[in-house]
Amino acid sequence: MATHDAIGIGYGAPQPLGSPDSLSRALAEAIGAACAARGDNESNRAALLAECLQLDAAGQADMLEHFRAEAQRFGAGDRR
């Protein structure tokens, strides 16, 4: 699985729960888990993340739950 740096999100200092950076980080992890479970490639992960990062915070939160559910549905388990 790719690191956050490989898909444009650096690790940096921990962010408060609910901050835009922590939401982006969680979304990247959920997309990575769902793509790994489905066998998708790195370019698909990056495209999904780029598209999701264009959404507002509420839309990103919805997509976070969607990708977490997809990861579980395809057998990756919960990687929160």
Image: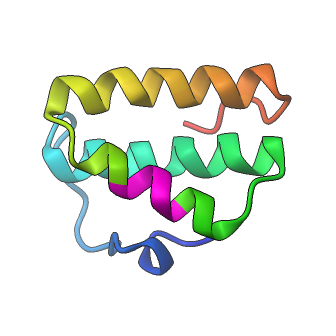
Which is the main secondary structure of the residues drawn in magenta? helix
Residue at position x 28%, y 42% from top? 23
Left or right: residue 64 compared with residue 53 = right
- Between 45 and 9, the one nearer to me in the picture: 45
Q: Residue at horizontal 75%, vertical 54%?
A: 40
> Would you identify the image quadrant in which residue 57 lies?
top left
Tell me where residue 42 appears, x and y as whole percent. 65, 68
Q: Quadrant of residue 74?
A: top right
- Determine whether, in the image, residue 14 is placed left or right of residue 26: left
Left or right of 39 in this view: 66: left
Could one spot residue 25 in this view of the protein? yes
Colour scheme in use = rainbow
Magenta run includes residue 32 = no
Segment colored magenta = 46-50
* Of the pair 7 and 18, the residue shown nearer to us: 7
Q: Position of residue 62 (x, y in %)?
A: 35, 20
Residue farthest bottom in this picture: 6
What is the x, y in percent for residue 12? 26, 74
Q: Is residue 58 above or below residue 37?
A: above
Assign the N terminus to one quadrant of the image: bottom right
Residue 7, compared with residue 32, is above or below; it is below
